[in-house]
Amino acid sequence: MDSYSYSKEINRSNVTFGEFDLEGIKKMFTQVFEFYNPRVKAEVFDSFCEDFYDLVKDTPTSNERVWRMVITDMLFNYDDRGYLETDTTDNKIKRKQFAIMAKVVIGKLRSDK
């Protein structure tokens, strides 16, 4: 166990994104929100997608764990502002829902290499 390094583990969990554009991001989130709860309210959906697109193109990290945290945090931010349609107020349940959604989003953004 003395050779274990958490920082080395983080460095190995990199993700390579494929090509994407704003329309592709909107299509992806339309699909994701069809299957998962909570959903971003319709009146802020375009803004949410634009925020996410800007975030993805301007964030230089390729670490999958960092991306899961960023996506989860973004969903919590929208939830705190009342922009999500949700069935629960329990943050523990939301954290699990957001983590699942983040993993799905990363899978959809991943390149096919």
Image (cartoon, helix red, strand yellow):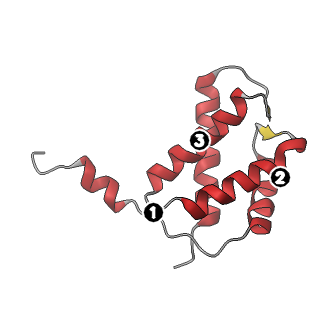
Residue 92 on image: x %, y %: 58, 24
Residue bearing mark 2: 46
Q: Quadrant of residue 12?
A: bottom left
Amino acid tagged 2: Asp
Query: Which callout, 3 or 2, points at the residue further toward the start of the chain?
Result: 2
Amino acid tagged 3: Thr
Other-residue count near label 1 (Cα within 10 Å), few / some / many at <14 / 14–19 / ≥20: some
User: Looking at the image, do the residues carrying marks 1 and 2 touch, with CB atoms under 8 Å apart?
Assistant: no
Q: How far apart are marks 1 and 2 (CA)?
A: 25 Å
- Residue in the picture at 76% in, 68% down: 24
Q: What mark, if any, has residue 72 been given in the picture?
A: 3
Residue 56 on image: x %, y %: 60, 60
Q: What mark, if any, has residue 51 been given in the picture?
A: none
Whether residue 34 is visible to the viewer of this picture, yes or no, is no
Q: Quadrant of residue 21?
A: bottom right
Amino acid tagged 1: Ser
Residue bearing mark 1: 62
Indicate whether 47 appears above or below 24: above
Q: Is mark 3 on a helix, strand or loop?
A: helix
Q: Nearer the viewer, residue 48 or 24?
A: 48
Position of residue 13 in the picture relative to residue 45 (left or right): left
Q: Residue furthest bottom?
A: 113
Q: What element carries label 2?
A: helix
Residue 14 on image: x %, y %: 42, 63
* Image quarter of the N terminus: top left
Other-residue count near label 2 (Cα within 10 Å), few / some / many at <14 / 14–19 / ≥20: some
Indicate whether 18 appears above or below 83: below
